[in-house]
Amino acid sequence: MKVLHVTSGGDTGGGKSHILGLLQALQDKIDAHILCFLEGPVYQEAVARGIPAHLLPQERRYDLSVVGKLRRVIEEGGYDLIHSHGSRANFILAFLKGRLKVPLVTTIHSDYELDFLGNIYKQLVYTNLNKLALRFFDYYLAVSEHFREMLIDRGFPGERIFTVYNGIDLSENTVPRLQRAAFLSQAGVEVLPGAPLVGTMGRLHPVKDQAVLLEAVPAVLDKFPDTRFIIAGDGDEGSNLLRQARRLGIDGAVHFIGYVEDPDSYFNAIDINVLTSRSESFPYVLLEGALHRLPTVATRVGGIPEMIVDGENGFLFTPGDSGALAQILIRLLGDGQLRREVGERFYAHVKENFSTAKMAATHVDIYKQILAAGTRR
């Protein structure tokens, strides 16, 4: 079986982790290749890992000269199935519907209606183009049951949608490059010895809603004044969040450290992992934190309740409810044993259920089902 994965190549977050982790795990199972339109992080790391990678440079998003070139790559490569990731790849592959004799599959990594929230132009153009392009695919892989149900509710055929949870490479070395003190010094974060650190990692974007963490900070500081908060990531929302922190009078306790190149050192430095998103799929930032046995607090959205059982291996709260978030953090900060137990249970759960090996095996089974079905709609 020979499969070509197609993506923009510009992903840096969970999308990059998913694609590269999946392709790496597929190498000893099928003949899996990747094709990118940008010489970005995905392409560069795929080459470094020895994953068969192709580059079709696209000067701009609407450069459609790559459509014909992609068709030739597919036909000359003898691929049995094409697997798309992301709006740019979806848009380009939609032009090949009916011109190829192989199934077109796409993974739904996020709620595509919210991908460009906060940018009116991109919402009007890119979101609608992606919504249109998705209708041209033969099969869909959803990274959570929640997303599968979302697609069905939006009129996609349930019998052509499969659920495949994200997986993380359990064999990767999670030993941090920098110990806590060194990482914090490099990040410009000053804390008292033994002071607890609450961290959140993700692009600074309205859908990630880091503002709700800032709203919870005053109540937490009232009970545990030495606590410090780290917000890792970059994005257009950064200036708004900084102004909010100053307005709340908490800017001395909150540190914006920008994009983190070394996530293992970051996770090793913090004591509690928080995710405040208003929409999520099956976030890697929680899986990565689990490998460091971190107690986790996250919003009850998307596929998160499919990985975290509230009160057992983590804690969930309603999006936007800063009061509930503050109470959970206060409880965890006041109980070291609870933090350790919850972190260990989450680690065990992720290790058993959400590995890249399991994710890849599920993909292969789905590919076989698709190819066995033969007739395309």
Image (cartoon, grey):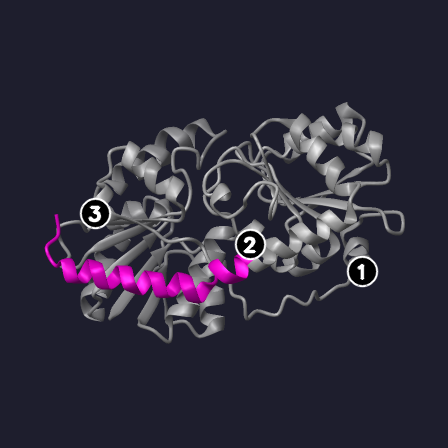
Question: On screen, 246 above or below 76?
Answer: above
Q: Is residue 113 visible?
A: yes
Q: Which residue is mark 1?
A: 182
Would you call the spot at circle 2 few (<14 residues within 10 Å), some (14-19), or many (20 or more)? many
Location of residue 190 with respect to 71 vertically, above or below: above
The quadrant in which residue 230 appears is top right
Viewer-nearest residue: 247 or 339 = 339
- Where the N terminus falls, by quadrant? bottom left
Residue sitting nearer the eye, 153 or 60? 153
Q: What type is the residue that disc 3 sits on?
A: Phe
Percent across and percent down for residue 74 are: 22, 64
Report if residue 289 lies within the magenta region.
no
Inspect the image, locate mark 2, and give the three-letter code of the amino acid beneath it.
Leu
State the residue lying farthest toward the left: 375
Secondary structure that dominates the magenta span: helix
Q: Residue at x 19, y 51 (%)?
A: 96
Element type where label 1 sits in the image: helix
Residue at numbered disc 2: 287
Q: CA distance from mark 3 to mark 1?
A: 50 Å
Q: CA distance from mark 2 to mark 3?
A: 35 Å
- Counting from the top left corner in percent of width and height, residue 347 is at 60, 58
Question: Do the CB atoms of the residues marked 3 and 1 lie less than 8 Å apart?
Answer: no
Residue 150 to residue 375: above or below:
above
Q: Which residue is mark 3?
A: 95
Residue 358 in the magenta stretch? The answer is yes
Of the image marks 1 and 2, the number of the one nearer the N terminus = 1
Q: Residue at x 48, y 65 (%)?
A: 44
Residue extending furthest right? 193
Query: Residue at 50% across / 51% down in the picture?
Result: 14
The stretch of residues the image draws in magenta is 349-377
